[in-house]
Amino acid sequence: MPADTTTPAPRTGAPHPSAAEAVAALGGVPREPGAPKPDPILVADDIHRQFGGLVAVDVGHLEVQRGVITALIGPNGAGKTTFFNLLTGFDRPDRGTWSFNGRKLCSVAAYKVARLGMVRTFQLTKVLSKLTVIENMRLAATGQSGERFLSALLPFRWNRQEQANTERADALLQRFKLDAKREDFAGSLSGGQRKLLEMARALMVQPELVMLDEPMAGVNPALKQSLLGHVKTLRDDGHTVLFVEHDMDMVRDISDWVVVMAQGRIVAEGPPEDVMADPTVIDAYLGAHHDTALTVEEEEELLRTQRATEEDKT
Amino acid sequence: MDWGQIFEFSLRAGLGSDAIIYAMAAIGLNVHFGYTGLLNFGQAGFMSVAGYGLASSVATFGLSFWVAIPIGLLAAVVFALLLGAPTLRLRADYLAIVTIAAAEIIRITVGSVSLLEYFGGRDGLQEYNDSFDRLNPYQGPLDLFLFTLRPDDAWVFTVGWILVGLAVLLVWALMRSPWGRVLKSIREDEEAVRSLGKNVYSYKMQSLVLGGVLGGVAGFLVALDQAAINPENFSTDVTFFAYTVLILGGAARVFGPVVGAILFWFLISVLGNFFTAATAGQDPLISPAIMDDNQASLVRFIAAGLGLVLLVIFRPQGIFGDKREIALDAR
């Protein structure tokens, strides 16, 4: 595992060879919703989730390329987080199939999804407040024999594994610059540090696919740069990253591929530069008439219709 | 007023069978509530299924005492599985509602007339602890310098404290292990734990069973202490006193329930004995216009309630708790 993470700026070293190949392979992919990828790690088909009368997610087809950073963007209420919840087993769709590494994941419990190598973080960070930072990290290690009831009573059966996990955790804490906070309660960390801890903790699971739900929300600009660097490092270490984000600078900066959702559907796909210039995307974010100024007459007309609809309701 | 006698009586209450039983019940609750965050409001139910499992196996069905013990424990396990299966996937408050209702169902069922021949109705069951008494090594009273115990009390006292000691040891060993770490993490945020690949439902169930079995042992001690068992031993206030004991000592601390139980019963007893002594006799310390001797025994609970309110305000973490942890909640 490369240890070149001492600078807070984005990593500039040579990426993992396979990462570079994976990025290059995206070159021939058509820029359209549901485009097939050369080496997909995650494939979703016809996923549909409805809350009462509201269709939150209605995704026809989506493939996520292995070894690259894919961003999932879209205006508030587009269904990004719901889609995340569905893929990771935290919520169940009304219909639809999806597979991870060729394995069907329909109605697989969330904890099994994580064990298969698809680990998520949360929009509102979920650190375990009354556990220390290092305990947060140790918890995330998989296959611990000390987590079985009877083995738990026999420390000699888990001591060595615990030690190995602690070493791995310490290395990660150092990489994410949380080593000074090792013995502090996780609840005493700042918002940005919590984001870092959550990301480090997810890596303890040794996932193939890391799914980050708004990793930049509530993080100060200085820490943002270092977070960006960490996300890039994930890819360069051979992880696949899928993240939800509102911060367009971040999306432009680090993502290799961008998927745009609006009103539950995927409306566009492509490399960041292409997607940002796509009129469908701009419409979805800003509304169709964002670039034309209203005349006085138009504004009055608009107000009149608004008032009329309000009166209709009452 | 004889302060020496008040102190002696109170000390006996603080170390005696009530304290032992509540320490045991609160150790079970500590596993549920303190470590896993499960709101079990039916610890009395776990106590009664095990206690009645023991008593009716011997007194009604004529089984050996040593067969009846595992039956009682098994009853507590089954009770935990029945309560946990439908509720542990739901939000925490559902478990609270279901457990408090189930404990009442058990209490009313064992006290019912139609099951009189099995559980003895409201009079309960007696004559099931011969095998236990026969093992009693104490021939005469046990002198513990500060107070003396009759032989059968001394025997329950000995067995009770040994069991509490073993339970404390078990909880200590489990909570320092990765298994205990998963429970504590579930208390903090179960979604996060799930996202890290742990089967949260299974761990909650294991916790419910373990704490329920410890509660079951407390039920055994209830049955053995009085050599008689009846539904009123397991009313809802038993659960709430056990919670008081737990909060007083400090939740999620290994020795919290034990120290909490000793202190709770000592203080209750000091207050009770003091008010009784102060209102008794020809010329009582407290004028009958303020309090008569009938009211004296109730005033201790009023004072205890006031004490609990003050505790929660000024030391919410309990005696053993860590103030830093409470501060985290305020963020």
Image: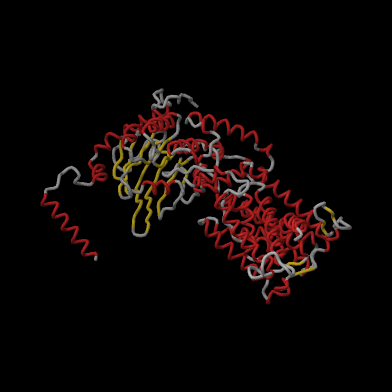
Q: Residue furthest front?
A: B283
Above or below for A35 versus B291: above
The answer to whether one can see residue A172 in this image is no
Above or below for A98 versus B278: above
Q: Position of residue A99 (x, y in %)?
A: 44, 45
In the depicted view, which residue is nearer to us: B123 or A202?
B123
Q: Quadrant of residue A279?
A: top left
Above or below for B258 versus A101: below
Q: Quadrant of residue B176?
A: top right
In the depicted view, which residue is nearer to us: B31 or A69?
B31
The residue positioned 58% from the left and 45% from the top of the image is B182
Q: Residue furthest right?
A: B139
Q: Position of residue A27 (x, y in %)?
A: 32, 31
The answer to whether one can see residue A82 in this image is yes
**Horizontal side of residue B184 vs A271, given as left or right:** right
**Horizontal side of residue B42 vs A177, given as left or right:** right
Q: Position of residue B161 (x, y in %)?
A: 75, 52
Q: Position of residue A153 (x, y in %)?
A: 68, 43
Q: How many marks?
A: 0
Above or below for A38 versus B325: above
Image quadrant holding the N terminus of chain B, namely: bottom right
In the depicted view, which residue is nearer to us: B138 or A80?
B138
